[in-house]
Amino acid sequence: MLLLVRHGRTELNAAGLLQGRVDPPLDHAGRAQAAALAALPVVGRASRAICSPLLRARETADALGVPVTVDGRWTELDYGTWEGRPFAEVPAGEWARWRADPGWSPPGGESLSAVGARVRPAVAALAAEAADSDVVVVTHVSPLKAAVAWALEVGDEVAWSIHLDPASLTRISLASGRPVVHSLNETAHLA
């Protein structure tokens, strides 16, 4: 089983800012969320964790108590000039264009299609291992959405139809020869 985890909360998440490649640590709530993830039996059974090189993902992965490998393909989307800004400050026309075209990127940033192009091989590389054992990937909202799109065999534009909370868990099985999404955005462990 592939266990996809969105990193715990940061101060920028709490403030509603676009983080992208900005590299803040987990805040107090994020550290508690990482501990809640670590307490899940399915996470404790995992053979290992793979994570983004960004601090918030590494801190979440380190809390899980399993061996961790850093893989840059799981890094968050680059928001370019939008990094660290509130959603409300993004020009409405640019936001609409981005939502309409997965190949469009924020100024100086990265498109949803580019994220999908780097995440799909990262997920495929874990397929055989995840068919035989539980593997955790700790990453960010955009790579998680790209992994779900891969599993569903749909285009990157589906990202706009998926919501994933900080410290949520999404499960994809690979034992049947093709990916099957078992759950999306599990958060009961955070209650």
Image (cartoon, helix red, strand yellow):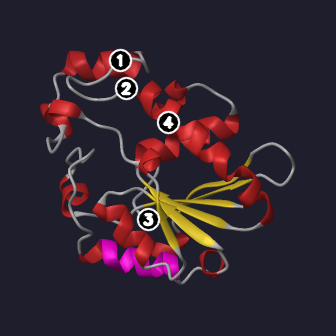
The crowd level at tag 3 (other Cα within 10 Å; few <14, some 14-19, many 20+) is many
Q: CA distance from mark 4 to mark 2?
A: 11 Å
User: What is the three-letter code of the residue carrying label 1?
Assistant: Trp
Q: Where residue 114 sits in the image (x, y, percent)?
A: 43, 28
Q: Tag 3: residue type?
A: Ala
Q: Which residue is mark 1?
A: 104
Instruction: Quickly name the residue at label 4.
Output: 118
Q: Nearer the viewer, mark 4 or mark 1?
A: 4
* 76 falls in the magenta region: no
Image spot of residue 56 (x, y percent): 31, 63
SS label for mark 1: loop
Contact, mark 4 vs mark 1 (Cβ under 8 Å)? no
Q: Which residues are magenta?
A: 30-38
Kindly identify which residue carries mark 3. 167
Q: Marks 2 and 1, how far apart in space?
A: 5 Å
Q: Nearer the viewer, residue 174 or 122?
A: 122
Using the numbered discs, state the Cα–Cα distance from disc 3 to disc 1 in whole angstroms.
28 Å
Q: Could you give the CA–CA distance between mark 4 and mark 1, rounded to whole angstroms?
A: 16 Å
Residue 111 is tagged as: 2
Q: Secondary structure at mark 2?
A: loop
Please report whichever mark, 4 or 2, sits nearer to the chain's N-terminal start.
2
